[in-house]
Image: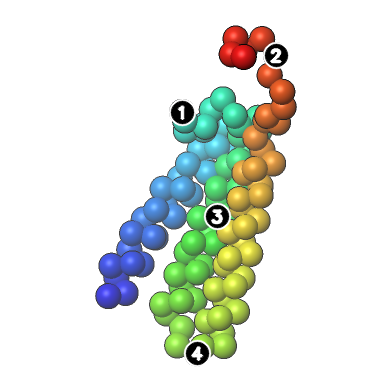
Amino acid sequence: MKLYVAVPVVLLALLIAASGVAGITRGWVLPTNRRPVHRPRLYGWGQLVGAFALCWQQVFFWVLSDPDIRQWGTLAGSVLLLTGLIMMMVSRRAGGSRQGSGTP
């Protein structure tokens, strides 16, 4: 049962990490996020932190058997994931009031 959860999450983390490396090295962001992202390198670092956090959580949840260490490791992974999400949020453009958008 462990592999059914761990393998897809690790593969997703690898895809996020690859996108983060592309954002850091080339300034490339996925097409769906190009318009709102203002600083692609910071966005890439946020993706790398998020990918690392997902792998961190998988290691501490599935590999370690001690409940105390597993609990603190998973909590640390959650804090890392939140840090990555905040980094990605900070890298986006401010969505203030639009003028001249054509909609009432």
For residue 71, what is the image quadrant?
bottom right
Local crowd at mark 1 within 10 Å, few (<14), some, or many (≥20)?
Answer: few
* Residue at position x 47%, y 30% in the image: 32
Question: CA gap, disc 3 to disc 2?
Answer: 34 Å
Of the 4 image quadrants, the one containing the C terminus is: top right
Give the label on residue 3, or none.
Answer: none
Q: Earlier in the sequence, mark 4 or mark 3?
A: 3
* Residue at position x 42%, y 79% in the image: 63
Q: Earlier in the sequence, mark 3 or mark 2?
A: 3
Q: Is residue 8 above or below residue 33?
A: below
SS at mark 4 in the image: loop
* Kind of residue indicated by mark 3: Gly
The spot of residue 75 in percent (x, y) is: 59, 73
* Kind of residue indicated by mark 2: Gln
The spot of residue 9 in percent (x, y) is: 39, 60
For residue 27, what is the image quadrant?
top right
Question: CA gap, disc 3 to disc 1?
Answer: 19 Å
* Kind of residue indicated by mark 4: Asp
Say if mark 3 contacts mark 2, CB within 8 Å: no
The residue that mark 3 highlights is 50
The residue that mark 1 highlights is 31
Local crowd at mark 3 within 10 Å, few (<14), some, or many (≥20)?
Answer: many
